[in-house]
Amino acid sequence: MFSFKWFKKKSPWILHYNAGSCNGCDIEILACLSPKYDLERFGVINCGNPKQADIFLVTGPVTYRSRERLIQLYTQIPEPKVVIAVGSCACTGGIFRSMYNVEDGIDRYIPVDVYTPGCASSPELIMDAVIQAVDIFEHKNQQLQSAKKLYRQPVFEQGRFCVSNVAKSLKDKDE
Ligand code: SF4
């Protein structure tokens, strides 16, 4: 279990989704993965499958056409997961806010853990956000593990209590 947690922390997998951006922020994400910034040195891998992702990186405002896909992708990522809104558009709707085909920032539909402002967001900010996201991921993972322990304990105790009660009532009948 220790090694699994360690690998998860040292190798977060990222799913990138463009919910309706102008591609400016997407280019900055690609710059992070280029040799100049080399985000992969932190073990980050850009994957294409939501079921393998730990961090959900979203750019652009939510458009009418992308909102269902956004929610679908979010629900397919297993717990624990961390969401980063990259760029002003993903944070608040940015320059596209209140347009006829746009529905503000992504936090209207899915919970956001880290906001990265800027139009476009700089690679340094995006990298900083990913490092913060790894810490949040670790914290959420610990919470999830302790919640699982809490859930198991009463069931076990209740089981023991029931057994002893049945045994007691049977004993009373015999007497
Ligand atoms: S924040 Fe700026 S660069 Fe990024 S998607 Fe919006 S308009 Fe484009």
Image (cartoon, rainbow, N blue to C red):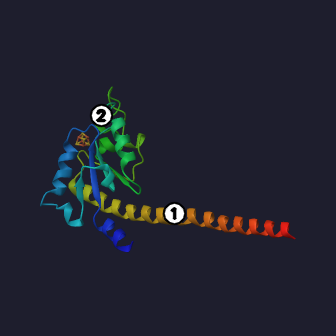
Question: What residue is shown with label 1?
Answer: 148
Q: Amino acid at mark 1?
A: Lys
Q: Residue at x 30, y 41 (%)?
A: 89
155 or 22, nearer to the observer = 155
**Is tag 1's residue or tag 2's residue first in the polypeptide sequence?**
2
Q: Is residue 116 visible?
A: no
Q: Residue at x 73, y 69 (%)?
A: 164
Residue 3 marker: none
Q: Answer with the quadrant where ligand 1 appears in the image.
A: top left
Residue 49 at x, y percent in the picture:
28, 50
Q: Amino acid at mark 2?
A: Phe
Q: Is residue 125 left or right of residue 157?
A: left
Element type where label 1 sits in the image:
helix
Q: Outermost residue toward the right?
A: 175
Question: What residue is shown with label 2?
Answer: 96
Specify whether tag 2 is near ligand 1 (CB below 8 Å).
Answer: yes
Q: Outermost residue toward the left?
A: 35
> Splitting the image into 4 quarters, where does residue 18 fall?
top left
Residue 73 at x, y percent in the picture:
34, 44
User: Which class describes the residues within 10 Å of circle 1: few (<14), some (14-19), or many (20+)?
Assistant: few
**How far apart are labels 1 and 2 at the CA level?**
42 Å
